Image (spheres, rainbow, N blue to C red):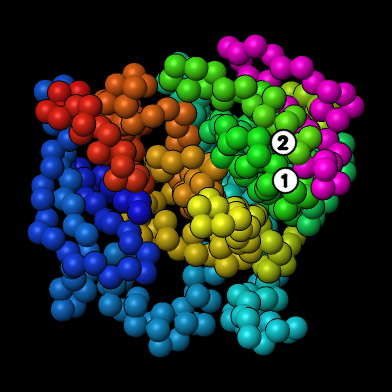
Amino acid sequence: MMMTLTMNQPQLRLLSRFGTRRLRAPPCKALSFGRGNRKIGSAFFSSKPTFSRDGISGPHGSYVDEYNQSIQDPQAFWKRAAQDLYWFQEPTNILSARKNDPNFYEWFADGVTNTCYNCLDVHVENGRGDQVALIYDSPLTSTQTKITYSELWKDVSTFAGALQNDLGVKAGDCVVIYCPPIPEAVVAMLACTRIGAVHSVVFGGFAAPELATRIKDCRPKVIISASAGIEPHRIVPYKPLLDLALDLASSHSVEPEHCVIIQRDNVERCDLLEPRDVDYYQLMKQAQPVPAVPLPSTHPHYVLYTSGTTGAPKGVVRDTGSYAVALKYSMSAFYNTNPGEVFWAASDIGWVVGHSYIVYGPLLHGCTTILYEGKPVGTPDAGAFWRVIEEHAVKALFVAPTAFRAIKQADPNADL
């Protein structure tokens, strides 16, 4: 379960998300959030939103009107939502049975688009290239970096060229990304999307057997990995874990052609096994940018594996068109954000929340997204979240309740 705080000064309003479960709503309790002796705002927690007879109003009209339209004529409803994206070929078939299996359905089957193009090129072409696209805030490395849409577009286009022209990755090939929340990981995700490669992000620091399981299943052509991850009190070397995982996967005849290694600053450089291993920054120096590849709406965007707590991890595939349309719609309808505002999903790119609401959702909508390499507490203290919110003027915070429990335990009187 994740929650969203929408910062409407002077209050913070919170919505809870419970998937398909039905829960009885307890009475609302008002909590105060402060930094030092200065109050930032109040949050009203409710397990279930309540609506008046006429519904609540939002950027898309009232909730009741939106809901009724989506039920009465879902094709017209989602056709309207799809018009907020750029299509190389606009879809006319909104929802249709799959040709080879009528028991399954496809969204926008005849549409052609590219999610990376909608995340970056559209904003640059519309004159918003100087707007900040991504804020990298890493208390673990004492680093803050702001990357504009134009800068991100250049890096992504260049790395996409490296994948396509230097490493031979083509549309439909799988690429595993094994990284902490760093800008290069976001660049890698978007670069794959730009050329139609199917990325599979594995949570940084996962043990070698877990990584090997995912490598064996998706059989990547290329793996992109950071040299290490950084935790509050230790360095986690990723390269030895990757090498062991590849040894385990090789017993199943799975051997990627290349591993692109991102050598991180402030940690010891790892050894590269040439010619398999390639340095990310050297690759970027010689690569040339490439345009976005027009892709069918049904083209697989990424595969993300379940945790495996009830059996073997299962790869969940998201397609291109319907995923982008739903995310773009959600940014305004659910989270009440506008292009140019700052959105922060306090998660990790290795999880589905990180895919949807650190990377693709905010960038599709033209927001500034925050990539946070830190913890709710301990980096340096329980005031870290409030520092990020205040410093970067966050409009909406997408966060798990466990983060607030940790903050409350460490700072019960809200002194920080």
Instruction: Determine the image quadrant of residue 28.
Output: bottom left
Residue plotted at (18% across, 52% down): 45
Instruction: Determine the image quadrant of residue 114.
Output: bottom right
Q: Which residue is mark 1?
A: 215
Q: Which residue is mark 2?
A: 245
Query: Which residue is at the front of the view, 355 or 296?
Result: 355
For the stretch drawn in magenta, what is the main secondary structure? loop
Query: Which residue is at the front of the view, 350 or 146?
Result: 350
Query: Which residue is at the front of the view, 176 or 165?
Result: 176
- Where residue 341 appears, x then y in whole percent? 39, 43
Type of the residue with mark 1: Ile
Magenta residues, start to end:
249-277
Count of marks, rendered view: 2
Q: Residues within 10 Å of mark 1 (few under 14, many from 20)?
A: many
Q: Looking at the rendering, in which quadrant would you find the C terminus?
A: top left
Type of the residue with mark 2: Ala
